[in-house]
Amino acid sequence: MPREKNKTLRLLVPLIVGLAAFGVVVSVYVQTMRPTSPPPAAERPAEQAPTETTAPEPREEIEPERPIAASPASPATPVSPETDPDQPGVVPGEDDPLVAGVDEPSPTDPRGLRVRPVAVAAEDPAPIGDTDPDSGHNVRVAFTPFGAGVEAITLTHHFQSIRREENYRVQERKIVEIRGRRYAAASLACLGVEIDGEFIDLFSDVSEGAPRPVWSEVGPGEFEAMIVDRDDAPVARVVKRYSVTPGSYAIRLEQTLENLTDRALEAQWYQYGPVDMPVGEVGYGGDKRRIRFGFLHDQRSDPSRQIVDTDNKLRTRDSVISSAERDPNRWERLWPTEDTIERGRELVWTSLTNRYFAFAVHPLVDEASFAAGQHVDRRFTQAQEVYGVVLGFGPERVLALQFNSPVNTVEAGQTLDLSLGAYAGPLGRRQLAAERSLEAVRLDLLVLYNFGGPCAFCTFQPLARGLMIFLGFMHDYLLRDWALAIMLLVVCVRGALHPVTRKSQIGMMRFAKQMQAIAPKQQKLREKFKDDPKRMQQEMIKLYREENVKFSGMFGCLPLFLQSPIWIALFAMLYFAFELRHEAAFFGVFQAVSAGHWIFLADLSAPDRFIYFGRALFTIPLFGPIESLNVLPLLLGLVFYIQQKYLTPPPTTALSPEQAQQQKIMKFMMVVMFPVIMYNAPSGLALYFITNSALGIAESRYIRAHVDKMDLEPPKPKKPAPAGPGPGRKQVSNTAPKNPFRKKREREGSPYKGRDRKKK
């Protein structure tokens, strides 16, 4: 008669696995369906906006038909949907700690400082660097005359797609249109300077209506602006000088403010930092653009002030956009926050990142002192405050970081140094660790293998980085192919975890067999004591003790769950590893046989694209944009089906309707839902799952074959021996032997003979 299966285990294991799968489904679904920008904010009554102070917006405005973009919103006032661009914007009160308030000079001010406009140049400013691979440069930086900012930063060796037709742009000037007027945000552009309480717009001159440039080009990447008073007498000279080095992704920006007067000036600098990164592919995993900060700990935690750390809270771009949507008349101060002020942290660098690239801004560090192991100042003093500036509304919103410097005293004839450095390149450890200027500020901390959300806390970075190092070793020194390296990495991880997996499965099988064996006795006890639950519980415990059933076997799946951080770290590492971007699988064999026309598995960071449609036909929930027929997710579903079919033993007893329904749900989740979610997943991840599942089938088969040769029944506790002699047993007396010296003592009159007699 077949033994009844353990119903408790059959309910518990599917429930735990189902909850875990449901959590993954919800997390990926939310990330996939999250729009790149929130919808436009609802209309708010005008009287709800703060109205303590009003001032005209120091922004450049132009006619919509002109190709030159206008200035970004001033540091004082973001534009809400209710604010008329033709009218002065609403400036929140000075007591608001989260508002980057800067007032323009009053028309009655006696000095009337302004920037001297220059003639419009016939040609665009000359770029620096080159995208020609033979030039030796890694970047090309183009400039805009407005704010002497960056028009675009283009990478030489990285492209938008595997076709290698268009170079990748890390930064590009963003233009938004608000009620017929156009506004622009350019990275590293100067917004203005406040001298002795007077704000001077250094982006452009709009005193005569049409915007005019205020920066004159002195040389390639070098610009100069002159600040004058009401009488056109020079007050200060502002100089910006960009430079790049061949073979480097670093950009050096030397900018100074020279005091040309005979008295001291109080100056505060306002400048754009990074501007929105390209969104990239968002079909799987959602928008991965983030704001990152590197900082120094307080003096007590780090007396040397030399250890740079980063916060892995992963502030997303969408969260900053949502904050601006909730209050369009206030921009959020991203640094410092109340928490960083309380902890005494000081800023070292800030960055905008997407999945594979970053644009970071940091201070210039004395490289010679750093190389000699001497103390260097890593504080980014030019950015005492960092604000998230949001321009535009709806899906076209643009995020830029604005830097506000502290108020500096510039003595007569002296120069204020406002120089900084920038990195525009891949999120690769080799690229970020290749230069001393980047190593000194620990920009390698930008590399983070973490999806965020519910799995953020259990994605251990040392583990993910170790797996990446091991993967790189196998690629560089063994296989020279990333797809084979991924598969071999899964084999190695599976092999390392096999003892734990084997012990867990054997423990669960032993517990299940014991529970099946005592199922009839349990049923009898339930029927016998159905009216006395307390007595039934006592008898059940007695039965478990007699049959040597240990409930620790019920938690045999616990070691499997303890392995989850390893697989989560491996999953995140493969998703964010820049090394896999635009890398073909299996030595590019599919491209070789088709002369490059078949892009199947041509990019491990993208879907396999067995048949590429050339464009997105449509977009549906969970799938994302459907632009190709992908076969790896279908193969993954087949592997899951075989795993379910092969590893799930047929029930020995009829299942209840609830149990049957649970089995159907689990099979549907694993065989259908998971491949659906993985349809637009990177092919490198799909190879990982297929290899892992196939190895799981082989491993389970091996363990089952080993278990079949074992006696899973644990030895029952021995009962105490019977009192009388049994057949074939020798009865042994448990009495002490007689004293051999007793008779001798009695003959010799020993004084102990009486004592011996008493003892007897």
Image (cartoon, grey):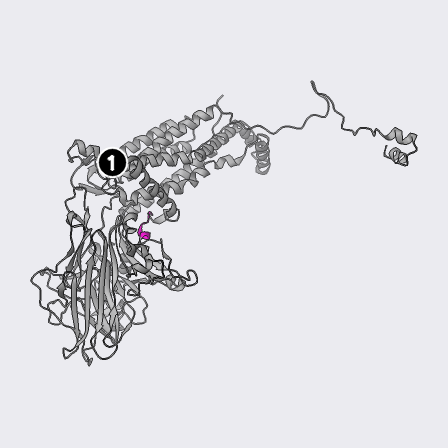
Q: What's the residue at 46%, 24% (across, down)?
A: 708
Residue 648 visible? The answer is no
Does 530 sit left or right of 342 as displayed?
right
Q: Which residue is labeled 1 in the image? A: 585
Q: Which residues are magenta?
A: 444-449
Residue 445 colored in magenta in the image: yes
Does 752 sit left or right of 286 as displayed?
right
Q: Residue 530 sits in which quadrant?
A: top right
Query: Which x, y percent locates residue 519?
Result: 52, 29
Is 613 or 426 nearer to us in this picture? Answer: 426
Q: What's the residue at 33%, 45% (across, down)?
A: 27
Residue 463 colored in magenta in the image: no
Does 134 sit left or right of 477 as displayed?
left
| Residue situated furthest top in the rendering | 728
Residue 321 visible? The answer is yes
Q: What's the residue at 21%, 32% (across, down)?
A: 589
For the C terminus, the image quarter is top right
Q: Residue 567 sits in which quadrant?
A: top left
